[in-house]
Amino acid sequence: MKIFEAFDLCGINLKNRIVMSPMTRSRAIDNLPNDLMVKYYSQRAGAGLIITEAVAPSANGLGYPRIPGIYNQKQIQGWKKITDAVHEKGGKIFIQLMHTGRVSHPENMEPNTTILAPSAIAAKGEMYTDSQGMKAFPIPKEMTLKEIKQAQIEYVKAAENAISAGFDGVELHAANGYLIDQFINSCSNKRTDTYGENKENRCRFAIEVAQQVANAIGENKTGIRLSPYGTYNDMGLFDDMEETFEYLAMELAKLKLSYVHIVDHSSQGAPEVPDAIKLKIQKAFGGHFIASGGLDKEKAESILNSHKGDLVAFGQAFLANPDLVNKLRNDLPLNQPDYDSFFTSGDKGYTDYPFAL
């Protein structure tokens, strides 16, 4: 079967086509990668490619409790233990860089930080904080041009730190309502300068970040995740959405990035992501394409055989089955995820899922 075949990802040799999706797990106490995370990722090194949970490129990018960063030396050292452990088992691992933008709260951030966004528009709803429970999203500060440039510098530095920590590459999180996606979406971006008003301007931040990161660490080590039809974190569907993502994919194609990774959460109740827009993005980008969205072995194989993706990503199945590749290969029953422990702080529901005997 194709899902078990080796794959050349722009010079990075993957032992199979199965990708572990990025999943926030909230185990990084004080925003530091730790030994529990070493165990978690090394358990899942059977994947052809692991994409880590979302990692903050700067202190301003911290949004949630206990998410890791990669902007100081202790964090780099913590991640080095993880990449070493994954590589020892023959795995490959990309870090996902996520600046949360407006999806944040001061209680989850370090002192002297600022919640930044393209426009001063608060997301509807609430966010969990360890110190005060659920709190309403605050109104973010609209970014100045100087702050936009600084955020881009932070992405580049974080990418360089990731390579220093032994990562095989970087995935830019431009999906799910976080900072890059906030620029792309006209519901959250009401700017009237060169970063707003039309699709070319709204995509500018994403393109510039991707270009600068690719220049710093290599285009073959730089991927990006997009979420057309995504409504997570109070993002809305907008009028020229399909044209915007098709344009963005065309511009990203010029950068010769490693891959585009499409989010599809329709299996979890999110709006359907039509095959038509996936095909438009895939055709416009022209490079490697990671498909996702409630996949099982048969669906994944069908995607590969019909050329709707080059790699296939599994999320919760990997969360609950550290030996997922072995179980898929041998048609073994899968553990079911423990939803109550997704974002807690201990090993329960994290590193204690049983392997197949």
Image: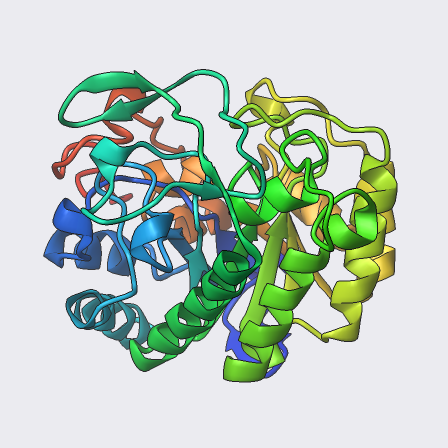
Q: Nearer the viewer, residue 7 or 331?
A: 7
Residue drawn 17% across the image and 39% down it = 352
Q: Is 341 left or right of 180, judged from the image as shown?
A: left
Give the x, y percent position of residue 242: 84, 39
Which corner quadrant of the image does residue 24 belong to?
top left
Residue drawn 20% across the image and 51% down it = 31
Q: Nearer the viewer, residue 294 or 235?
A: 235
Give the x, y percent position of residue 295: 59, 37
Q: Is 346 left or right of 333, judged from the image as shown?
A: left
* Residue 93 seen in this snapshot: no
Residue drawn 36% across the image and 72% down it = 162
Give the x, y percent position of residue 40: 23, 51
* Residue 158 seen in this snapshot: yes
Where's the N terminus, which quadrant?
bottom right
Where's the C terminus, which quadrant?
top left
Give the x, y percent position of residue 261: 63, 53
Q: Is residue 32 above or below residue 234?
A: below
Q: Nearer the viewer, residue 185 or 7?
A: 185
Q: Is 7 left or right of 334, judged from the image as shown?
A: right
Q: How many marks?
A: 0
Q: Nearer the viewer, residue 101 or 69?
A: 101
Q: Is residue 173 above or below residue 136?
A: below
Which corner quadrant of the image does residue 348 belong to?
top left
Q: Is residue 74 above or below residue 100?
A: below
Instruction: Indicate the colouring scheme.
Output: rainbow
Residue drawn 60% across the image and 24% down it = 267
